[in-house]
Amino acid sequence: MNTQFKIDLDLIPTTFDAIHAYLAATVFGLALTIIILLFVLLISAMRKAKKPEQKATDNKEQAISTSIPKREPEVKIVEKIVEVEKIVEVEKIIQQPAPEPIVLKEATPDAALQLLNLLQTEARFIDFIKEDVNAYSDQDIGAAARVVHTGCNKALNEHFTLTTVRTEQEGSKITLNKGFNASEVRLTGNIVGEAPFTGTLVHKGWQVTDIKLPKLTQGHNANIIAAAEVEL
Amino acid sequence: MKGLFNTGQSTQDNPSTDSEAETITDFNTASEDGTDSTEMPEPIEQNSAPVPESAGTHVSIGIDLGTTHCVLSYVDISDLDADERVHQVLQIPQLTAPGTIEDKAQLPSFLYQAHEAEINEGDTALPWTPKPDYLVGEIARNLGSKTPIRLVSSAKSWLCHAGVDCKSPILPPEAPEEVTRVSPYQASVAYLQHLCNAWNQQHPNTPIAEQEITITVPASFDPAARELTAEAARSIGLQNATLLEEPQAALYSWIEKSHGDWRNHATVGDIILVIDVGGGTTDLSLIAVTEEAGNLSLTRIAVGDHILLGGDNMDLALAYTLKAKLEKDSKRLEPWQVQALTHACRDAKEKILSDNDADNIPIVVPNRGSSLIGGTLRTELTRDEVNSVLLQGFLPEISSDEHPVSRARSGLRTTGLPYAQDAGITRHLAAFLTRQLNAVDDLNGVSLPENASFIHPTAVLFNGGVLKATRFSDRLMGVLNSWLRTEQAPEARLLTGIDLDLAVARGAAYYGFVRKGKGVRIKGGTAASYYVGIESAMPAVPGMPPESEALCIAPFGMEEGTETDLLEEEFGLVVGEPVRFRFFGSKTRREDTVGTRLDYWTDEELEELDEIEVTLPEENRKAGEVVPVYLCASVTEVGTLELQAVSSKDDNHWKIEFDVRAGDE
């Protein structure tokens, strides 16, 4: 047919048609990507060359620091405390050695829910507290209180071993020597001078020496403190 | 042997078990040093958890398979000469509610057949299995208290119930059709299985099947019930479990607790009466102290009937008293309120019986709905009511010749359990002591005055949670001593020091040590003599059933591991056909020897048990052929009675089965 393609390299187009414009754009774009790629390659090659050096130093550091507890968190927490205490008093911070890291114990909700469950099952605790006591006479409340008291007592005895902190009679004079445990004995009133302190035992205190909570199976929903009951 | 967990009691136990656990630690490490020094001591996960024994430790385990609860006690016996022996009680993990597992010293002997919609998938998981076959323990009791139609209880009493097939699914007896029933035997297996799993999980180095195991049974258990218990143990791999009578176990516990001092509290000629009042049963035994080669020795000389009467009956009696009182004030009680009343009465009973100052105990039954204050039912249990209902009703002050109105095991063809018809425990006691008047005739060193009308105990050992109440034990001692005084006999003294709830299990664990040849062993053998019924060779009288004779095949007091001589009597057994014999036991005929024929006996003397059955296999013989055999009896090392038919022509033996398939045919 007539439509035979001839390639004539001497021919220079006199007008810029659409195809040529596209061609030029493509060439420009490709050139750009090649340049970017080359740059990326160059930078990564430089980094790789640096890294082994760093690793080597890192390893050294680790080898040394394994015997020492991790430094990083300590540093962070110290910073925090500084921030807090700055507002109060600046001088003291400088004098104090780095305080122990404060780790707040997170109470698991499961144990709390279990306790509620025990108190409800044995003592109808939630029922009692959630009821409007104003509507009833003292006699009625007293009768219900027996149920709660007996049940709570049973639940406590079964799952906790309770002892008093101090064995002395309440109201008697006791002496606390230097170095007594301030979390076991709380001083109140006229706290002046140095230990030994002598005072009246107001409350003998309670402490749990053993705790025996039920274990839960996987997937057991502890949020249900008392299941609804339907009699068939 | 108590109906309910006593909370105060279990907490009291905790510190002691803890300290015991500490002592055993020392004990263990000491033995480790000697035997296996390479083994590292295992880490302790919890403060209360005992340290697992090192491999190679030998433990004696005592299992109290009770009517209302089970206890497992254990003691290390790898070093038999160790000075100190520390008894511990296994903390048994068990479901208490769906999804909740608690460790408790006692496993309630209840089984619950839950509906599939009742409990979520996965909520019945135990530490050793994601889904147990049966719900047993606390959860069964808790769920069953609100849905009694699905609750299996008192399986043990059914084992000893003549006239039912203990291997057919009959429990719960009053359940609707669709509830899957289990057999009393299967229920016992389930409790044992739970205990074994609990042990193996906590003591991985000392699997239970390799230890010395003792299972206690009531002294009044007949041979068939003993065999069923032994079979239940065998079925879960406890091949070497030995049986021990509960009152004996209680006495062993007393001996063990006294640390050798018991010899100062018992003298030759003593007759010790063991009274065991549990949650559901009352068990009586007499043990005599004699001298043998300069040493004190103990012989169990008599056991009482199986009396289905215990602490649960008392709680029920009190609840019905209060119910009547409330109904007088025109308050109608629903069944659940009566049940709650029973629970409340149990606690109140213990308080009023042990506390001399408490005169009135308020009893409150709360409403079931969430409103607690509004619908509460309030009443009072007074000391007078406790006195009249419990002390007069269960422990009446009677003379020693007053006996129960009717015998405990009279109706053999009832659908329920044969509960004792007379609630007077003292009357049962009087009858027992009178029946056993001749129990010490053959013993040297023990004698009774000429005029005695009943056997005179010189010492009393109590067991069972009910007798923890001081007023109860005082009353029982008072009544017994009043009988003794009327016969000018010295008053009996009370042996104390045992833990009334755990003594049986502890004593059973101690028995494993005794079986190794250490300590004192209570002798006694079988507590009854056994007879087969044969038709007498009299000419038939029209209109009269053929006269029956009883032929003694096992005498009283056969020791474990002994065998009787062959009977002279020859029986013709038909090959291929089951041949059945009537079977009798006597707890009083001590003088009968093998071959003694009785043509007359009173109901007092001989008690008819379930029939026994033998089937000769057809191998080498023609069906219908008659083979002449002799009968003989032996007592196995386990403690069960075995009857055999021995061919008189060759050496063939066939086992005679206790017929558990008898029943309402």
Image: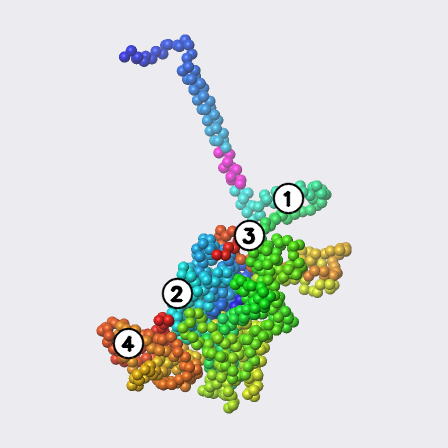
Q: Label 4 vs label 2: CA separation?
A: 34 Å
Span colored in magenta? A48-58
Query: Where is residue A202 drawn, in percent x and y?
Result: 72, 60
Give the residue displayed 38% in from the left and 69% down from the top: B165
- On the image, the x and y values in percent for residue A201 come to 72, 61
Residue named by callout 1: A78
Instruction: Report whether B574 appears left or right of B35.
Output: left
- Residue A17 lies, with reference to residue A31, above or below; the image says above
Q: Give the foreground label among 4 and 1.
A: 4
Where B447 sits versus A77, above or below?
below
User: Along the polypeptide, which appears first: circle 4 or circle 2?
Assistant: 2
Answer yes or no: do the residues labelled 4 and 2 have beta carbons within 8 Å? no
| Chain letter of the residue beneath label 1 in the structure image | A
| Circles 2, 3 touching at the beta carbon (< 8 Å) | no
* For the residues bearing labels 1 and 3, Cβ distance under 8 angstroms: no
Q: Nearer the viewer, mark 4 or mark 2?
A: 2
- What number is the disc on residue B652? 4
Is the same chain shared between marks 4 and 2?
yes
At numbered mark 4, what does the secondary structure look like: helix, strand or loop? loop
Closer mark to the observer between disc 1 and disc 2:
2
Q: Report in which chain the residue with disc 4 lies.
A: B
Q: Position of residue B385 (x, y in %)?
A: 60, 72
Tag 1: Cα neighbours inside 10 Å, few (<14), some, or many (≥20)? some
- CA gap, disc 2 and disc 3: 41 Å
- Judging from the image, mark 2 belongs to the subunit labelled B
Q: Which residue is mark 3?
A: A110
Disc assigned to residue B169:
2
> What's the magenta bit mostly, secondary-structure-wise?
helix
Which residue occupies the foreground of this view, A205 or B323?
Answer: B323
Look at the numbered disc 1 and give the secondary structure of its residue.
helix
